[in-house]
Image: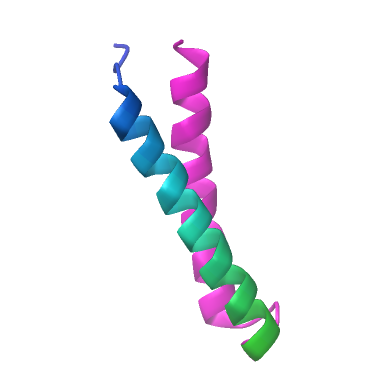
Amino acid sequence: MLVKFNHDEKKDLINTIDSIREKMIQAGMQEGLASMRTIALSQTLDEYITKYQAIKLTK
């Protein structure tokens, strides 16, 4: 089943990815790359990037 996303939903997803990326960078700089918070943010970022890639493939 293909899920269609409109332009605003794609834009929101990109904004979310950018926000999580910034939080992850800050956590990495403040707490270290191996901190639980940095790792959790990295995993969350991976999930959102995967969603974005799926959208791009269905285009």
Q: Quadrant of the N terminus?
A: top left
Task: Please tell me in which quadrant of the rendered image residue 33 appears.
Answer: bottom right
Which residue is rendered at x = 39% and y = 41% of the image?
13
Residue 55 on the magenta segment = yes
Residue 19 on image: x %, y %: 47, 60
Residue 7 or residue 30, whichever sits in front: 7
Q: Position of residue 18 (x, y in %)?
A: 52, 54
Q: Position of residue 47 (x, y in %)?
A: 47, 46
Against 19, residue 1 (above or below) is above
Vertical comparison of 46 with 50: above or below: below
**Quarter assignment of residue 11:** top left
Residue that appears at 56% across and 66% down: 22
Look at the image and name its color scheme.
rainbow
Q: Nearer the viewer, residue 30 or 36?
A: 30
Determine whether 26 is above or below 57 in the image. Answer: below
Q: Is residue 49 magenta?
A: yes
Q: Residue at x 63, y 89 (%)?
A: 31
For the image, the number of numbered tags is 0
Q: Residue at x 61, y 83 (%)?
A: 35
Q: Which residues are magenta?
A: 31-59
Give whichever of 39, 59 is nearer the camera: 59
Task: Specify whether 10 is left or right of 46.
Answer: left
The rendered magenta stretch, by its main secondary structure, is classed as: helix
Q: Position of residue 2 (x, y in %)?
A: 32, 12
